Image: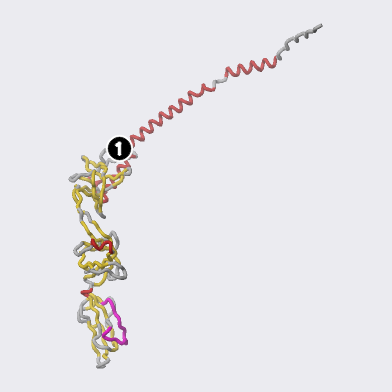
Amino acid sequence: MTTFARPRPPRAVPAWLLLAVVTLVLAGAAAPRAGAAEPAGHAEHAAADHAGDHADADHGDAHAGHDDGAPIRLDAAARAEFGVRTAVAGPVALHDELVLPCEIRPNDNTLAHIVPRFAGIVTAVRVEVGQQVKAGQVLAVVESDESLTTYEIRTLIPGTVIGRHITLGEAVDRAHAAFVVADLGTVWADITVYPRDLDRIRPGLEVSIGAGPEDDGAVGTIGYVAPVVDEATRTALARVELANPDGRWRPGTFVTARVTVDRPEVAVAVPREALQTLDGADVVFVLAGDGFVPRPVVVGRGDRAWLEVRSGLAAGEEYVATGGFTLKAELLKDSFGGGHAH
């Protein structure tokens, strides 16, 4: 006979468990939803972004003076104080130059090697190196070996004693110079010319002689070009005669020669100091009404003083030749909100 189990009666839920469930449900209902606080935070970010937009706009306004071409105005006193001077654009003959080494030497045409007339013994020396002498002045006294009488060695020309080759008691003869006297009122500037430049060097070219590449101490012309190249140095010689009334040019001094080999003329050129750089571009300040504005330009060839302007500035326009750096500083100051009213 089949036996069926009797079902168990349901177990009662403990009271403590019911209390815990109710508590959790009530706590969940009272707590704010996670997304409820998000709009406030989002609003704060939006406000910050909006404020940032205003700040960017203000920053852009600060640079507006640089971009909108507003003239920079300086009164006459400010222009004079900062050295702002204008010029009218026009043609300029540039200097196409060669920069070559050079040495100052005595002028051989005003130099004398003084030799004894007879062999003998030096009994007196009357001058020193560097001393100025007059023509016919006694330089030394020698006792002749032949006649046993004394005779005087005299200079043939006026000038400076640049060499003395005898001493008291020394035996001298006619084969060796006792003194060298030079009139240093003029000197030679001997220019070293390299073979690659020989075709460009000729008599009559203008030369600036200076102590350095940027020094124009004296200006002369080439009067002589050697017809041969030195076998030892493989260079040629070009010579300029320089006036030297104050003795500035001392023989033996190494200097720099700038030889002008050509003078090409360009339609428009400005002094190098007139060219300024703004935002990576070359500009020249031009007159605009009662103020100045920067004008982009394209430059070409140039020399130490001038630069050709190929475009951006026309002949006849008035531009700032000196003091452009001051205007650039004013423009940059204005771009940071400083203003440029003077």
Q: Which SS does the magenta portion mostly show? A: loop
Q: In which quarter of the image is the N terminus?
A: top right
Q: Residue 219 at x, y = what percent?
A: 22, 63
Residue lying farthest to the bottom in this orientation: 147
The residue identified by callout 1 is 67
- Give left or right: position of 34 versus 251: right
| 203 over 339 or under it: above or below | below
Quarter in which the C terminus is drawn: top left
**x then y, percent, for residue 175:** 27, 84
Residue at (69% x, 16% y) in the render: 16
Expressed as whole percent of the image width and height from the top left, the position of residue 198 reads 25, 63
Q: What residue is rendered at 34% in x and 35% in y?
A: 60
From this viewpoint, which residue is outermost toward the right? Answer: 1
Extreme front residue here?
Answer: 1
In reply to whether residue 142 is colored magenta, the answer given is: no
Instruction: Report the front residue among 99 and 275.
Output: 99
On the question of residue 120 being in view, the answer is: yes
Left or right of residue 102, residue 223 in this image = left
Q: Residues within 10 Å of mark 1 (few under 14, many from 20)?
A: few
